[in-house]
Amino acid sequence: MAFIAISFVVTIAITINSSLLPLYYADLHYPLAWVGLNFTVAAAVEIPCFYLSGRLITRFGQMQTVVIGTAIYAAKYAIMAWAPKAPIVIAAQALDGIAYALFWSASVDMVNRLAPTGRTSSAQSLYSALAGSLSGIIATATGGWILGNFGPRILYAGMTLATASMILPFVGLAKAVSHSRSSRGPSLD
């Protein structure tokens, strides 16, 4: 449950970005015709990253891969908060593709590992409901309000802080899980 709760904060930021990126473009007077290119770049990058994610998870561990993905998301949102020129925003979408592949691959794997025996389907369903559905409800309502009242720079600065602030809880959880499972099986670090 702790992993799902920490991930929930990160997925709120992810959903804000995917839902409100066109409004970010409009508010900053970027060419709206380029909005689709952002998602194209991210998707093109995430395909090979998904392929490589298993190797990275094996090499670094599930939680470290989640942390790496989270840190990349935070870096991407920091770039977006700076509100650079549109071509830089499009280039930053490569970070989104990397982060997405690493975060989600390792998160799904992590939920399976942390789930009680015989409860992996229930754990994945709960993770999907919270990380996918409930985070979307909160993200679109809160993100839209922040964007409308404070603008895209403040919205993305807040996303940067929220995402970056989840790195330490993920690290702490990794240590706690590794310690509690050290006598029962392989480490999750």
Image: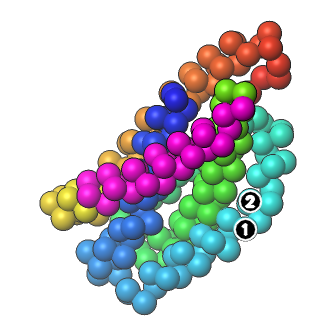
Taking the image as shown, residue 156 lies to the left or right of residue 144, namely right
Q: CA distance from mark 2 to mark 1?
A: 5 Å
Within the image, what quadrant is residue 21 found in? bottom left
Q: Residue at x 77, y 65 (%)?
A: 48
**Which residue position is annotated with label 2?**
50
- Choose top left, top right, bottom left or bottom right for residue 163: top left
- Can you give x and y, in whole percent of width and height, for residue 95 in the image? 59, 60
In depth, the one of 106 and 124 nearer the eye is: 124
Q: Secondary structure at mark 2?
A: helix
Decide: is 19 above or below 127.
Answer: below
Is residue 100 found inside the magenta-colored segment of the image? Answer: no
Q: Quadrant of residue 62?
A: top right
Residue type at mark 1: give it.
Ile
Check the image and tell me how it is coloured.
Answer: rainbow
Which quadrant of the rendered structure holds the C terminus? Answer: top right
Going 38% across and 42% down the picture, which residue do you hit?
161
Residue named by callout 1: 47
Q: At label 2, which amino acid type do we have?
A: Phe
Tell me, yes or no, whether the highlighted magenta stretch contains residue 121.
yes
Dominant secondary structure, magenta: helix
Q: Residue at x 63, y 72 (%)?
A: 43
Residue 67 can be seen, yes or no: no
Q: Residue furthest front?
A: 118
- Asked if the residues shown at circle 2 and circle 1 are in contact, with their CB atoms under 8 angstroms apart, the answer is yes
Residue pictured at 48% horizontal, 35% vertical: 6
Mark 2 crowd level (few <14, some 14–19, many ≥20, 10 Å Cα): many
Stretch of the chain drawn in magenta: 118-142
